[in-house]
Amino acid sequence: MATTENGKTVLSAQEARGGKELGVMRYVLHISLALAVIAGIVIYAIFFH
């Protein structure tokens, strides 16, 4: 439960997070990074080869 200290609302870590930790964003980051690298290689191969 939120508490007030010195006129400020203080939340616990669980309350501040407000949701579940799924770890899905890690996969989104890896896939998008891999696709960006592949796109860069393809563009390089087309224009500078």
Image (spheres, rainbow, N blue to C red):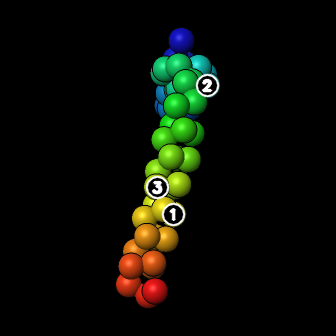
Q: Who's the residue at 59% across and 20% down the image? A: 14
Name the front one of labels 2 and 1.
1
Q: For residue 42, what is the image quadrant?
A: bottom left
**Label 3 sits on what residue type?**
Leu
Q: Who's the residue at 45% across and 79% down the image? A: 44
Residue 30 at x, y = what percent?
55, 47
Q: Who's the residue at 45% across and 78% down the image? A: 45
In terms of depth relative to the viewer, which is nearer, 20 or 38? 38
Give the distance between the C-alpha atoms of the residues marked 1 and 3, in whole angstroms.
Answer: 5 Å
Q: Who's the residue at 57% across and 30% down the image? A: 23
Residue 20 at x, y = what percent?
53, 19
Please say if 24 is above or below 45: above
The residue labelled by disc 3 is 35
**Label 2 sits on what residue type?**
Ala
Please say if 13 is above or below 26: above
Residue 18 at x, y = what percent?
48, 21
Please say if 18 is above or below 38: above
* Outermost residue toward the front in this view: 49
The residue labelled by disc 2 is 13
Mark 2 Cα within 10 Å, few/some/many (few <14, many 20+)?
few
Kind of element beneath mark 2: helix
Would you say residue 4 is visible in this rendering? no
In terms of depth relative to the viewer, which is nearer, 22 or 39? 39
